[in-house]
């Protein structure tokens, strides 16, 4: 589960509970760029902080247990 999936889940939460629809657009001056830019107003700044906190906590809840069980695999426990 990549960082993009957790970010997408938070955008779905914003859309459902706060009514914020995030829109992305490619900048016209950089037509060859693949980077999308969003000018969406999230409302109060605490929503951005809560989104960051959500992504960090879900990342830690997935990565630490996965690393624990990965280390228990045969031959891996001798390397790490």
Image (tube, helix red, strand yellow):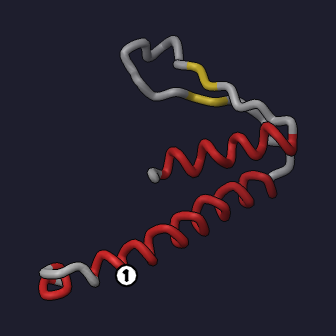
Pick out the residue farthest to the front. Answer: 74
Horizontal side of 41 relative to 78 (left or right) equals right
Residue found at the far bottom of this picture: 78
Q: Is residue 18 above or below residue 36?
A: below
The answer to which quarter of the image holds residue 30 is: top left
Q: Which quarter of the rendering shows the C terminus?
A: bottom left
Res 46 quadrant in image? bottom right
**Number of on-image labels:** 1
Q: Is residue 19 above or below residue 27?
A: below
Left or right: 34, with 21 as reference point: left
Residue occupying the point 17% across, 81% down = 74
Question: Hey, which quadrant is residue 22 in on the image?
Answer: top right
Left/right of residue 69 with respect to residue 54 in the rendered view:
left
Question: Where residue 15 sits in the image (x, y, percent)?
Answer: 79, 37
Q: Nearer the viewer, residue 44 or 20?
A: 20
Q: Is residue 77 above or below residue 32?
A: below
Q: Which residue is depicted at the point 49% across and 68% down?
A: 62
Q: Nearer the viewer, residue 27 or 53?
A: 53
Residue 71, image x, y percentages: 27, 81
The picture places residue 75, in percent across and down from the top left corner, at 12, 81
Mark 1 surroundings: few (<14), some (14-19) or many (≥20) residues within 10 A: few
Q: Residue at x 60, y 68 (%)?
A: 57
Horizontal side of 50 relative to 63 (left or right) equals right
Q: Which residue is mark 1?
A: 68
Dot 1 falls on a residue whose secondary structure is helix
Q: Which residue is at 57% across, 28% downward?
A: 37
Where residue 50 sits in the image (x, y, percent)? 74, 60
């Amino acid at each position: 589960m990549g960082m993009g999936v957790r970010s997408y889940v938070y955008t779905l939460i914003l859309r459902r509970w706060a009514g914020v629809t995030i829109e992305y657009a490619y900048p016209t001056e950089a037509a060859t760029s693949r980077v999308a830019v969003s000018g969406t107003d999230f409302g109060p700044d605490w929503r951005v902080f809560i989104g960051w906190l959500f992504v960090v906590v879900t990342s830690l809840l997935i990565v630490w247990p996965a690393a624990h069980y990965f280390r228990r695999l045969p031959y891996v426990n001798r390397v790490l």
